[in-house]
Each structure stands twice: as structure tokens, then as C-alpha cells.
Amino acid sequence: MLRGDHITVRYGEHTVVDDVSFQLEEGQWLMLAGPNGAGKSTLIEAIAGGAVYTGRIELGGKDIRSLKSGQLARKIGVLSQKNTVSYAYSVEEVVGLGRYAYRQGILSGGQDEDKEQVERALRLTGLEDLRRASMLTLSGGELQRVFLAQVFAQDPEILILDEPANHLDINYQQQIFSLIGDWLKTPGRAVLSVVHDLSLAKRCGSHAILLNNGKCEASGRIEDVLTPANLDRVYDMDVSAWMKGLLSQWL
């Protein structure tokens, strides 16, 4: 569904992503893992069109550079880790913005399909009772659910997520990742996400890319990538012992 060949991103003389290739297939949840500064979010930005890169990124076999923004938005939905709201839009209005790529013109009214997709997104994320609430009154977890609903309303084939549950309480983390997992069960879909929490990556992901200093250290099935040997080398510590020590506090 999505393929990257020899992706490199440079800012001046600094190489942030260094010759990284990847492949995302239907039904996969591909996790981008690695320490801070590894290039995870920059790779996401390149795919989403927010960073200049060399190499080639293909969507359904087509170079994404050849696709118009509207075409891209119908295929790929992006959820950032930080979303801010400074106006008192309602939840329903913000979710409805996910249908922008399907509008025929700036003044065109909403179509029946738009309304159906918005209703479905509100239902999937449990926001039906908050549809008329002001965005300015919501908690952090509720805000992130609204923006996830906006992406669901967009009805893409691929979700790209940059730390979707970062800074959220564990109950909201569970909600967000469960919602994404349920969304992925529909055929013809795939997910690519940046994660810092290795436990969440192993629990939810099917495949992974382990990055370090912009380079790909390992890629493939998640159990073959997030191994003690790979993690110890990349993080320069005994990751397995640290994680087991944390777990032991609850046993």
C-alpha cells in the first residue's frame, strides 16, 4: 500500500533520515521505534509532505509527488501528537473537517455520505454525547479522540500517527490504541505510527522499523525487530532488564 525507497532528509549539513526504506502492506500496523533524535517523526513528515526528501515514496504504486493534496487526503490520514484549538468550534464541526477532501468546491454543502461518515466517526470514538460541546472545554484525552474521529471521518486507507497517545493518561492511551486497532480490522487498511513506549509497540504492532541516528537498524516482524540484542545496541542499555524491573513492581 505504501512504500519508501532510500528516503533521506537533510537540514543543511545535518542528515536526519539516512537512506531508509520501508514497505507497508494491508492489515499491518508498522511501528517506528527508536530513541529521541532517531528520525522517526521526520520520516512521518516526509511521507505526509511536510519535509523535503530524496528517494521515492509510492502510494499504491504511484509516486506521491505526482498526487494532488486532495487525492492524497483521500488515501492517507495523519494524526499529529499535538493539536491545538483556539476557537470555540463544536466537536461535530471539527470532525466534519475530515470530509474537506471530498468537497467539490469551497462553497459546496455537505453530502449525505459526509454526514454518514461523521456520524460513524463520532460513534466509533464514543463522542456522540459531546457532539455539540465546545473544543475549548475538552480534556486532553477527549481532544485527541476528536482529532482521531476527524481522521476516521476522512475515511482513508492508511493512518499515519505521530505518538497518538503521547502525554495522555493510561486510560486514554488504552482507548486510543483500541480504537485504532478496531479501525484496522476492516480490509484494505494499514497503520504506520511513531511510538516511544516499547510495550505499546509490542502489544499493538505487527511490524516495526528500529531507527537510530537516522539509520534503519532493523526492520520486519515486530518480534524479530524489538529483540533484546537490537534494543540494547540502539538504546545503549539493558532494555530488557529495565522493563522487567518495572514489571516486577506489579507482581
Image (tube, rainbow, N blue to C red):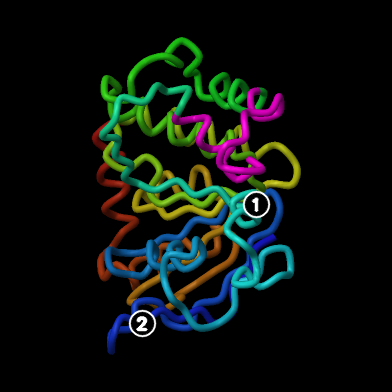
- Going by the picture, which residue comes out furthest to the bottom? 13
In the displayed structure image, the side of residue 74 where residue 187 appears, left or right: right
Image point (26%, 70%), residue name: 236
- Going by the picture, which residue comes out furthest to the top? 129
Magenta run includes residue 11: no
Task: Locate the C terminus by quadrant.
Answer: top left
Question: Where residue 152 sits in the image (x, y, percent)?
Answer: 57, 35
Q: Which mark is residue 221?
A: none
Above or below residue 57? Residue 154 is above
Magenta run includes residue 96: yes
Residue type (three-letter) at the residue carrying disc 1? Lys
Label 2 vs label 1: CA separation? 27 Å
Q: Name the residue tied to disc 2.
A: 10
Q: Quadrant of residue 135?
A: top left
Above or below residue 98? Residue 27 is below
At label 1, counting other C-alpha atoms closer than 10 Å, the crowd grade (few under 14, some 14-19, many 20 or more) is some
Above or below residue 194? Residue 14 is below
Image point (65%, 63%), residue name: 2
Question: Where residue 70 sits in the image (x, y, percent)?
Answer: 61, 53
Marks 2,1: beta carbons within 8 A: no
Residue type (three-letter) at the residue carrying disc 2? Arg
Q: Earlier in the sequence, mark 2 or mark 1?
A: 2
129 and 135: which one is in front?
Answer: 135
Task: Locate the N terminus by quadrant.
Answer: bottom right
Question: Where residue 243 sits in the image (x, y, percent)?
Answer: 31, 49
Q: Is residue 178 visible?
A: no
In the displayed structure image, the side of residue 16 where residue 145 appears, left or right: right
Above or below residue 148? Residue 130 is above
Q: Name the residue tied to disc 1.
A: 75
Q: Which residues are magenta?
A: 94-115
Dot 1: element: helix
Dot 2: element: strand
